Image (cartoon, rainbow, N blue to C red):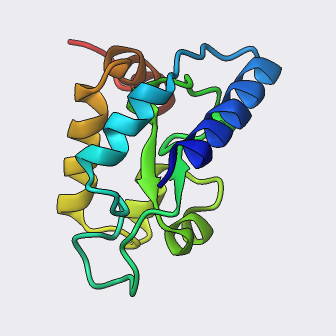
Amino acid sequence: MNKKTISSWIRQARYRANKRNIYSDLQISDVQEIVESFDGKCAYCSETTNCQKSEADTLDHPFPLSDDTPNVPANVLPICKKMKATKKNHDLAWLFATGAIERDTYLRLVKFILSRRGGDTMKKHIKTITGIQDE
C-alpha cells in the first residue's frame, strides 16, 4: 500500500471524524507503521484460508467511526477488499460473531488494538459499547 493511498484514506477519515465531532489523532507515520507490522497483509484474513488474496488493498476502522469511535492509530487495520465488503459498517466483534474471522484472529487483533497508541482511548470506547465496568 503506497503513501498516496494511505494519505487519501487518512484525509477521508479525518473529514468523517470532524463531521461527527469525534476525537481524531491519526498521522501518516502511524498508519505506515501499522501496515508494516502486518507485512502489507490483510489483518482479518492473512492467517486463514477464508480469502484467496491476503494482500491489503485498503484500510479499515475495526470499530467504525459511525459508532462514534475515535479516529486513532489503535482503530486502524490494513485489510483486503473482500473483507471490506464482508465487514461493511460492522465492527470487529460482528466479524467474529458471524464466523468471518476465527477466535484466535479476533483475540490477536484486540490485543494489537489495545497495544497501539490510542489503545487506552479504544479500551474506554469498547467498555462503553459493551457495558463492561471496572471492578
Q: Residue at x 44, y 63 (%)?
A: 56
Residue 113's image quarter?
A: top left
Horizontal and vertical percent position of residue 8: 67, 40
Q: Residue at x 61, y 36 (%)?
A: 7
Name the one closer to the observer, 21 or 38: 38
Q: Is residue 92 left or right of residue 111?
A: right
Is residue 122 placed above or below 62 in the rendered structure? above
Horizontal and vertical percent position of residue 73: 42, 27
Q: Residue at x 56, y 70 (%)?
A: 81
Name the one closer to the observer, 27 or 97: 27
Image label count: 0
Name the one closer to the observer, 7 or 124: 7
Q: Quadrant of the C terminus?
A: top left
Residue 23's image quarter?
A: top right
Name the one closer to the observer, 30 or 52: 30
Q: Is residue 68 left or right of residue 45?
A: right
Q: Is residue 9 left or right of residue 126?
A: right
Q: Can residue 131 be seen in this snapshot?
A: no
Q: Can residue 123 be seen in this snapshot?
A: yes
Is residue 36 placed above or below 14 in the rendered structure? below
User: In the current view of this chain or complex, which residue is farthest to the right?
Assistant: 19
Residue 96's image quarter?
A: bottom left
Horizontal and vertical percent position of residue 92: 43, 51
Q: Residue at x 43, y 35 (%)?
A: 31
Is residue 34 placed above or below 49 in the rendered structure? above
